[in-house]
Amino acid sequence: MAVPKKKTSKAKSRSRRASNWVLRPPARSVCPQCRQAKLPHVVCPNCGWYKGRQAVEVD
């Protein structure tokens, strides 16, 4: 079984972990009913439609 020759330093392992600490913008999709941007798999906040039907009443 392979064994590392040297200990991995704290800086090396932490810098490898820190590469995933990036803030990414949330994913967006287009509502097929009103053509507004919305989060995927979520009821449209503008018109209240989800999966081809009226899910929520919006004023």
Image: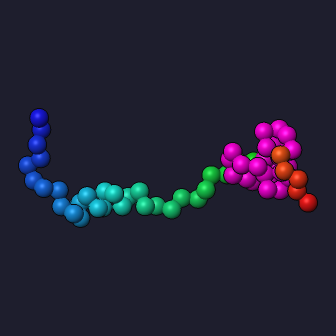
Quick one: which residue is furthest to the front in this view?
56
Outermost residue, bottom side: 11
Magenta part mainly helix, strand or loop? loop
Residue 31, horizontal then vertical, whole percent? 78, 47
At 43% across and 61% down in the image, what residue appears?
A: 21
Judged left or right of residue 49, residue 42 is left
Where is residue 17 drawn, in percent x and y? Answer: 34, 57
**Is 11 situated above or below 2?**
below
Q: Residue at x 36, y 61 (%)?
A: 18
Q: How is the image coloured?
A: rainbow
Q: Is residue 41 magenta?
A: yes
Give the residue drawn at x 83%, y 46%: 55
Q: Residue furthest top?
A: 1
Q: How many marks?
A: 0
Of the 4 image quadrants, the one containing the C terminus is bottom right
On screen, 57 above or below 41?
below
Residue 5 lies in the magenta-colored region:
no
Please tell me which residue is depicted at 62% across the width and 52% down the height of the picture: 27
Q: Residue furthest right?
A: 59
Picture layout, residue 33 above or below residue 25: above
Residue 26: image x %, image y %?
A: 61, 56
Along the line of sight, the residue nearer the viewer: 49 or 28: 49
**Which residues are drawn in magenta?**
31-54
Q: Is residue 56 left or right of residue 41?
A: right
Q: Quadrant of the N terminus?
A: top left
